[in-house]
Amino acid sequence: MKETKRMNESYTSFAQVYDMFMDNVDYPSWSKYLIQLLKEYQVEDGLVLDLGCGTGNMTELLAKEGYDMIGVDNSEDMLEIASEKREKSGLNILYLLQDMREFELYGTVKAVVSICDSINYILEEDDLREVFSLVNNYLDPKGMFIFDLNTRYKYEQMGETTIAENREEASFIWDNYYDPEEEINEYELAIFIPAGGDSDLYRKFEEVHYQRAYDLAMVRRLLEEAGMEFVTAYDAFTKDVPKPESERIYVVAREKGKSAEK
């Protein structure tokens, strides 16, 4: 299907330089906020799934906090880098190469998290409902699902924008477009990586990424249609309700339908 191709083409060559260009993300602060939410909902240890784990930055931080981590991503390149980090840290993390729309686990987990707008990469309502249904299926009774989303407001503010960054290790040009009717944000990446050796040449890679804006009402409806219980939503990194100008929101949902009795 078209969306599968789109998702699988993302983060191939960019995986090589992803962490370098994402060094503006304060992962320690993000993890502190996420851990605070997990513990608020009594998830203090046990199995946690990081859905759309990428190169494993958040997965590693949660593992260091004492959670037994599983990371799922559909990019083999990203998981290679995540595995290299695991080798260095010595943390016991299980990484699985799977599409979040059809992921499978060996059993249930206490919580599922999905951070850094991984959910925005799901472009179709039916697919998002299926992701939510799978999450509900693999959660322990009353298990928690915490994820973030870029908002329509953020995409509208980005609009048609070009961002360029030049570094010694690599450079990129990011052309961003937002279609308000389709609610699809598209960004084209041109990445220039040194060819290596004594050469002054660069290898050029081009990628196109698509993300969809979902309003909170639709997210809540899809969660409930998937059998989950919507708990709350926050303006990112606060306990405030989302505002019209919120650029990122966190959604908290709970497993519904299983009995805790053995």
Image (tube, rainbow, N blue to C red):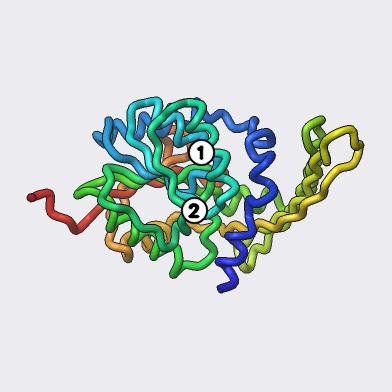
* Residue at which label 1 appears: 83
Q: Residue furthest left?
A: 261
Query: Looking at the image, is 173 positioned above or below residue 220?
Result: above
User: Which residue does the image show at 64% across and 31% down from the upper left?
Assistant: 24
Q: Quadrant of the N terminus?
A: bottom right
Q: Residues within 10 Å of mark 2 (few under 14, many from 20)?
A: many
| Amino acid type shown at disc 2 | Ile
* Residue at which label 2 appears: 119
User: Which residue does the image show at 22% across and 48% down from the upper left?
Assistant: 140
Query: Looking at the image, is 82 positioned above or below residue 99?
Result: above
Query: Looking at the image, is 64 positioned above or below residue 105?
Result: above
Closer to us: 211 or 218: 211
Which tag, 1 or 2, sits closer to the chain's start? 1
User: With 215 as the anchor, is 224 left or right in this view?
Assistant: left
Q: Secondary structure at mark 1?
A: helix
List x then y, in percent, for residue 9. Answer: 64, 59
Q: Report, in whole angstroms, how far the alpha carbon at label 1 lies from the one at label 2.
A: 22 Å
Q: Secondary structure at mark 2?
A: helix
User: With 243 as the anchor, is 175 left or right in this view?
Assistant: right
Closer to us: 76 or 150: 76
Asked if residue 75 can be seen in this view, the reply is yes
User: Which residue does the image show at 81% across and 44% down from the upper left?
Assistant: 192
Q: Residue furthest front?
A: 197
Q: Quadrant of residue 62?
A: top left
Closer to us: 57 or 83: 83
